Image (cartoon, helix red, strand yellow):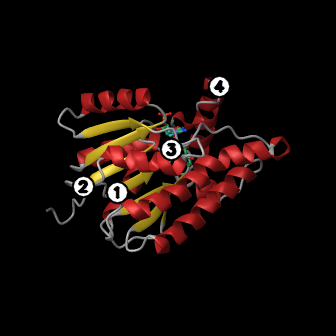
Amino acid sequence: MSKYNKLAGKHVLCIGGTKGLGRGTAEASIEAGARVTIAGSSQHSADTAVSEIKALYPSATIAGFGCDLSHDTVEQDLDALFDKAGGDVDHVVYTAAPGLAISGLQDVTPEMVRRTSHMRQVVPLMLGKVAARRLPRTPEASLTLSTGGIADNPRPGWALMAYVANGLVALTRNLALDLAPVRVNAVEPGFVDTALWRDLAPQAKADMMRAIADKVPTGVAGRVEDVAEAYVYLMKDRNATGEIVKTRSGGQLV
Ligand SMILES: NC(=O)c1ccc[n+]([C@@H]2O[C@H](COP(=O)([O-])OP(=O)(O)OC[C@H]3O[C@@H](n4cnc5c(N)ncnc54)[C@H](OP(=O)(O)O)[C@@H]3O)[C@@H](O)[C@H]2O)c1
Protein backbone atom coordinates (compact mmCIF):
# COMPACT_ATOMS: atom_id res chain seq x y z
CA MET A 1 0.00 0.00 0.00
CA SER A 2 1.24 3.50 -0.82
CA LYS A 3 2.34 5.53 2.21
CA TYR A 4 0.74 8.73 0.95
CA ASN A 5 -1.94 7.65 -1.48
CA LYS A 6 -4.19 6.33 1.25
CA LEU A 7 -7.29 6.20 -0.95
CA ALA A 8 -5.90 3.52 -3.27
CA GLY A 9 -8.12 0.44 -3.03
CA LYS A 10 -10.56 2.08 -0.60
CA HIS A 11 -14.33 2.22 -1.11
CA VAL A 12 -15.72 5.77 -1.06
CA LEU A 13 -19.47 6.39 -0.85
CA CYS A 14 -20.42 9.90 -2.06
CA ILE A 15 -24.00 10.71 -1.05
CA GLY A 16 -24.80 13.62 -3.34
CA GLY A 17 -22.14 12.36 -5.75
CA THR A 18 -24.16 12.93 -8.93
CA LYS A 19 -23.42 16.67 -9.06
CA GLY A 20 -21.29 19.48 -7.72
CA LEU A 21 -18.86 18.90 -4.87
CA GLY A 22 -19.86 15.26 -4.35
CA ARG A 23 -19.32 14.55 -8.04
CA GLY A 24 -15.92 16.26 -7.90
CA THR A 25 -14.99 14.22 -4.83
CA ALA A 26 -16.07 11.01 -6.59
CA GLU A 27 -13.88 11.85 -9.59
CA ALA A 28 -10.91 12.83 -7.38
CA SER A 29 -11.31 9.56 -5.45
CA ILE A 30 -11.23 7.59 -8.71
CA GLU A 31 -8.06 9.44 -9.72
CA ALA A 32 -6.61 8.39 -6.35
CA GLY A 33 -7.36 4.73 -7.08
CA ALA A 34 -10.50 4.30 -4.97
CA ARG A 35 -13.61 2.31 -5.79
CA VAL A 36 -16.55 4.70 -5.74
CA THR A 37 -20.29 4.46 -5.13
CA ILE A 38 -22.35 7.58 -5.77
CA ALA A 39 -25.92 8.29 -4.72
CA GLY A 40 -28.35 10.89 -6.02
CA SER A 41 -32.01 11.65 -5.52
CA SER A 42 -33.10 9.21 -8.26
CA GLN A 43 -31.76 6.14 -10.06
CA HIS A 44 -31.98 8.10 -13.31
CA SER A 45 -29.63 10.85 -12.10
CA ALA A 46 -27.26 8.24 -10.61
CA ASP A 47 -27.18 6.30 -13.91
CA THR A 48 -26.54 9.50 -15.89
CA ALA A 49 -23.66 10.52 -13.60
CA VAL A 50 -22.14 7.02 -13.68
CA SER A 51 -22.08 6.98 -17.49
CA GLU A 52 -20.57 10.49 -17.62
CA ILE A 53 -17.88 9.50 -15.10
CA LYS A 54 -17.24 6.21 -16.95
CA ALA A 55 -16.71 8.22 -20.16
CA LEU A 56 -13.99 10.22 -18.36
CA TYR A 57 -12.46 7.26 -16.49
CA PRO A 58 -13.19 4.07 -18.49
CA SER A 59 -11.35 1.78 -16.05
CA ALA A 60 -13.07 3.20 -12.93
CA THR A 61 -14.91 0.87 -10.59
CA ILE A 62 -18.06 2.87 -9.95
CA ALA A 63 -21.70 2.17 -9.12
CA GLY A 64 -24.61 4.56 -8.66
CA PHE A 65 -27.89 4.34 -6.81
CA GLY A 66 -30.96 6.49 -6.35
CA CYS A 67 -31.65 7.27 -2.69
CA ASP A 68 -34.17 10.04 -2.11
CA LEU A 69 -33.39 11.28 1.39
CA SER A 70 -36.24 13.76 1.64
CA HIS A 71 -38.53 11.39 3.54
CA ASP A 72 -38.91 10.55 7.21
CA THR A 73 -37.76 7.01 6.36
CA VAL A 74 -34.23 8.42 6.00
CA GLU A 75 -32.64 5.94 8.43
CA GLN A 76 -34.02 2.91 6.55
CA ASP A 77 -33.20 4.59 3.23
CA LEU A 78 -29.57 5.08 4.30
CA ASP A 79 -29.33 1.50 5.57
CA ALA A 80 -30.65 0.29 2.20
CA LEU A 81 -28.05 2.44 0.43
CA PHE A 82 -25.20 0.92 2.46
CA ASP A 83 -26.59 -2.55 1.62
CA LYS A 84 -26.62 -1.72 -2.11
CA ALA A 85 -23.11 -0.25 -1.89
CA GLY A 86 -21.95 -3.67 -0.71
CA GLY A 87 -21.39 -3.26 3.03
CA ASP A 88 -17.63 -2.61 2.75
CA VAL A 89 -17.56 1.19 2.63
CA ASP A 90 -14.43 2.85 4.10
CA HIS A 91 -15.32 6.54 3.67
CA VAL A 92 -18.63 8.39 3.44
CA VAL A 93 -18.87 11.89 1.99
CA TYR A 94 -22.17 13.73 2.38
CA THR A 95 -22.88 16.63 0.01
CA ALA A 96 -26.56 16.02 -0.77
CA ALA A 97 -28.68 19.18 -0.62
CA PRO A 98 -31.65 20.70 -2.40
CA GLY A 99 -31.20 23.87 -4.46
CA LEU A 100 -30.56 26.95 -2.37
CA ALA A 101 -32.83 29.97 -2.59
CA ILE A 102 -32.00 32.67 -0.07
CA SER A 103 -34.91 34.78 1.08
CA GLY A 104 -34.94 37.67 3.50
CA LEU A 105 -35.80 37.31 7.18
CA GLN A 106 -39.35 38.58 6.63
CA ASP A 107 -40.03 35.75 4.17
CA VAL A 108 -38.92 32.92 6.48
CA THR A 109 -41.70 30.50 7.51
CA PRO A 110 -41.69 27.48 9.86
CA GLU A 111 -42.19 25.26 6.80
CA MET A 112 -39.09 26.77 5.15
CA VAL A 113 -37.06 26.15 8.33
CA ARG A 114 -38.23 22.51 8.41
CA ARG A 115 -37.50 21.99 4.68
CA THR A 116 -34.05 23.59 4.87
CA SER A 117 -33.16 21.69 8.04
CA HIS A 118 -34.18 18.27 6.75
CA MET A 119 -31.32 17.64 4.32
CA ARG A 120 -28.81 19.71 6.29
CA GLN A 121 -29.56 18.63 9.86
CA VAL A 122 -31.95 15.64 10.06
CA VAL A 123 -30.19 13.61 7.36
CA PRO A 124 -26.59 14.29 8.56
CA LEU A 125 -27.54 13.26 12.11
CA MET A 126 -29.25 10.08 10.90
CA LEU A 127 -26.25 9.44 8.63
CA GLY A 128 -24.00 9.67 11.69
CA LYS A 129 -26.21 7.10 13.41
CA VAL A 130 -26.13 4.71 10.44
CA ALA A 131 -22.40 5.25 9.74
CA ALA A 132 -21.63 4.39 13.39
CA ARG A 133 -23.05 0.91 12.68
CA ARG A 134 -21.73 0.55 9.15
CA LEU A 135 -18.18 1.88 9.00
CA PRO A 136 -15.23 -0.22 10.18
CA ARG A 137 -14.15 0.85 13.70
CA THR A 138 -10.80 2.33 12.76
CA PRO A 139 -9.38 5.86 12.22
CA GLU A 140 -8.78 4.79 8.63
CA ALA A 141 -12.55 5.15 8.13
CA SER A 142 -14.28 8.52 7.94
CA LEU A 143 -17.49 10.47 7.53
CA THR A 144 -17.20 13.94 5.97
CA LEU A 145 -20.14 16.35 6.10
CA SER A 146 -20.64 19.71 4.36
CA THR A 147 -21.36 23.06 5.96
CA GLY A 148 -20.80 26.53 4.44
CA GLY A 149 -18.86 29.78 4.86
CA ILE A 150 -21.99 31.45 6.26
CA ALA A 151 -21.20 29.60 9.51
CA ASP A 152 -18.40 32.15 10.15
CA ASN A 153 -19.46 35.14 8.08
CA PRO A 154 -23.02 36.32 8.78
CA ARG A 155 -24.74 38.19 5.94
CA PRO A 156 -28.01 40.13 6.03
CA GLY A 157 -30.86 37.85 4.93
CA TRP A 158 -28.97 34.60 5.58
CA ALA A 159 -30.06 33.91 9.19
CA LEU A 160 -31.63 30.54 8.41
CA MET A 161 -28.56 29.24 6.54
CA ALA A 162 -26.20 30.61 9.23
CA TYR A 163 -28.25 28.77 11.84
CA VAL A 164 -28.16 25.50 9.88
CA ALA A 165 -24.46 25.81 8.93
CA ASN A 166 -23.42 26.34 12.54
CA GLY A 167 -25.57 23.40 13.59
CA LEU A 168 -23.55 21.27 11.17
CA VAL A 169 -20.30 22.47 12.77
CA ALA A 170 -21.56 21.41 16.22
CA LEU A 171 -22.88 18.11 14.85
CA THR A 172 -19.53 17.31 13.21
CA ARG A 173 -17.58 17.92 16.40
CA ASN A 174 -19.93 15.82 18.54
CA LEU A 175 -20.16 12.97 16.04
CA ALA A 176 -16.36 12.81 16.08
CA LEU A 177 -16.71 11.68 19.71
CA ASP A 178 -19.76 9.47 19.13
CA LEU A 179 -18.18 7.58 16.21
CA ALA A 180 -14.60 7.40 17.52
CA PRO A 181 -12.26 5.92 16.41
CA VAL A 182 -14.00 6.55 13.07
CA ARG A 183 -13.20 10.14 12.11
CA VAL A 184 -15.89 12.76 11.46
CA ASN A 185 -15.09 16.10 9.80
CA ALA A 186 -16.74 18.71 7.60
CA VAL A 187 -15.79 20.88 4.64
CA GLU A 188 -16.80 24.55 4.76
CA PRO A 189 -16.86 25.92 1.21
CA GLY A 190 -17.42 29.51 0.22
CA PHE A 191 -19.32 30.15 -3.02
CA VAL A 192 -18.78 27.45 -5.65
CA ASP A 193 -20.37 27.49 -9.10
CA THR A 194 -22.54 24.33 -8.92
CA ALA A 195 -26.13 23.20 -9.46
CA LEU A 196 -26.84 24.31 -5.87
CA TRP A 197 -27.78 27.69 -7.35
CA ARG A 198 -30.17 26.18 -9.93
CA ASP A 199 -33.20 28.04 -8.55
CA LEU A 200 -31.64 31.38 -9.49
CA ALA A 201 -32.39 32.75 -12.95
CA PRO A 202 -29.30 32.32 -15.20
CA GLN A 203 -28.62 36.07 -15.29
CA ALA A 204 -29.01 36.39 -11.52
CA LYS A 205 -26.58 33.49 -11.02
CA ALA A 206 -24.06 34.99 -13.47
CA ASP A 207 -24.36 38.37 -11.68
CA MET A 208 -23.83 36.72 -8.30
CA MET A 209 -20.72 34.82 -9.46
CA ARG A 210 -19.30 37.99 -11.03
CA ALA A 211 -19.92 39.98 -7.82
CA ILE A 212 -18.13 37.26 -5.82
CA ALA A 213 -15.20 37.20 -8.25
CA ASP A 214 -14.89 41.01 -8.02
CA LYS A 215 -14.77 40.83 -4.22
CA VAL A 216 -12.71 37.80 -3.16
CA PRO A 217 -8.86 37.79 -3.04
CA THR A 218 -8.54 34.86 -5.49
CA GLY A 219 -10.63 36.77 -8.05
CA VAL A 220 -12.85 33.77 -8.73
CA ALA A 221 -15.57 31.75 -6.95
CA GLY A 222 -14.51 28.25 -5.88
CA ARG A 223 -14.05 25.58 -8.52
CA VAL A 224 -15.35 22.07 -7.84
CA GLU A 225 -11.98 20.46 -8.64
CA ASP A 226 -10.30 22.63 -6.00
CA VAL A 227 -12.87 22.34 -3.22
CA ALA A 228 -13.04 18.56 -3.76
CA GLU A 229 -9.43 18.43 -2.52
CA ALA A 230 -10.66 19.29 0.98
CA TYR A 231 -12.90 16.19 1.05
CA VAL A 232 -10.03 14.04 -0.24
CA TYR A 233 -7.67 15.46 2.38
CA LEU A 234 -10.11 14.69 5.21
CA MET A 235 -10.51 11.10 4.04
CA LYS A 236 -6.74 10.65 3.94
CA ASP A 237 -5.50 12.37 7.12
CA ARG A 238 -6.00 9.75 9.87
CA ASN A 239 -4.99 12.44 12.37
CA ALA A 240 -7.95 14.73 11.57
CA THR A 241 -11.25 14.38 13.40
CA GLY A 242 -13.76 16.97 14.58
CA GLU A 243 -12.18 19.40 12.10
CA ILE A 244 -13.81 21.92 9.80
CA VAL A 245 -11.70 22.48 6.67
CA LYS A 246 -12.39 25.82 5.02
CA THR A 247 -11.90 26.61 1.33
CA ARG A 248 -13.51 29.97 0.62
CA SER A 249 -11.63 31.99 -2.05
CA GLY A 250 -10.43 34.20 0.85
CA GLY A 251 -14.02 35.43 1.18
CA GLN A 252 -13.66 35.53 4.97
CA LEU A 253 -11.13 38.38 4.64
CA VAL A 254 -13.29 40.89 2.79
N1 LIG B 1 -21.98 25.37 -4.05
C1 LIG B 1 -21.76 26.31 -3.11
O1 LIG B 1 -21.59 27.50 -3.40
C2 LIG B 1 -21.76 25.90 -1.66
C3 LIG B 1 -21.34 26.85 -0.70
C4 LIG B 1 -21.34 26.51 0.64
C5 LIG B 1 -21.78 25.27 1.04
N2 LIG B 1 -22.19 24.36 0.10
C6 LIG B 1 -22.70 23.08 0.58
O2 LIG B 1 -22.00 22.01 -0.03
C7 LIG B 1 -22.90 20.90 -0.19
C8 LIG B 1 -22.83 20.42 -1.64
O3 LIG B 1 -23.32 21.45 -2.48
P1 LIG B 1 -23.17 21.37 -4.08
O4 LIG B 1 -22.87 22.74 -4.52
O5 LIG B 1 -22.30 20.25 -4.46
O6 LIG B 1 -24.69 21.02 -4.50
P2 LIG B 1 -25.25 20.44 -5.90
O7 LIG B 1 -24.29 20.62 -6.99
O8 LIG B 1 -26.61 21.05 -6.06
O9 LIG B 1 -25.41 18.86 -5.62
C9 LIG B 1 -26.39 18.44 -4.71
C10 LIG B 1 -26.46 16.94 -4.67
O10 LIG B 1 -27.49 16.61 -3.73
C11 LIG B 1 -28.30 15.59 -4.28
N3 LIG B 1 -29.65 15.67 -3.73
C12 LIG B 1 -30.52 16.72 -3.80
N4 LIG B 1 -31.69 16.38 -3.23
C13 LIG B 1 -31.55 15.10 -2.79
C14 LIG B 1 -32.43 14.18 -2.14
N5 LIG B 1 -33.69 14.50 -1.83
N6 LIG B 1 -31.97 12.94 -1.83
C15 LIG B 1 -30.69 12.58 -2.18
N7 LIG B 1 -29.83 13.41 -2.79
C16 LIG B 1 -30.26 14.65 -3.11
C17 LIG B 1 -28.28 15.86 -5.77
O11 LIG B 1 -28.65 14.67 -6.43
P3 LIG B 1 -29.53 14.68 -7.82
O12 LIG B 1 -28.73 15.47 -8.78
O13 LIG B 1 -29.64 13.24 -8.12
O14 LIG B 1 -30.84 15.33 -7.47
C18 LIG B 1 -26.82 16.26 -5.98
O15 LIG B 1 -26.02 15.11 -6.13
C19 LIG B 1 -24.28 21.39 0.26
O16 LIG B 1 -24.49 21.03 1.60
C20 LIG B 1 -24.15 22.89 0.16
O17 LIG B 1 -25.04 23.57 1.01
C21 LIG B 1 -22.17 24.64 -1.23
Q: Position of residue 243 (x, y in %)?
A: 47, 68
Q: Which amino acid does label 2 sit on?
A: Lys
Q: Quadrant of residue 47?
A: top left
Q: Which amino acid does label 1 sit on?
A: His
Q: Which amino acid does label 3 sit on?
A: Ala
Comparing labels 4 and 3, the label whose residue is closer to the camera? 3
**Relative to 129, is 51 on the left or the right?**
left
Q: Mark 1 points at which residue?
A: 91
**Relative to 110, is 161 on the left or the right?**
left
In the picture, the disc for residue 96 is 3
Write the residue at 21% across / 63% down: 4
Helix, strand or loop under label 4: loop
Earlier along the polypeptide chain: callout 1 or callout 3? 1
Q: Mark 2 points at which residue?
A: 10
Q: Where is residue 177 in the image (x, y as percent from the top left)?
A: 48, 75
Q: Mark 4 points at which residue?
A: 201
Residue 246 in view (yes/no): no
Cα–Cα gap, marks 4 and 2: 40 Å
Earlier along the polypeptide chain: callout 4 or callout 1? 1
Mark 3 close to ligand 1, CB under 8 Å: yes
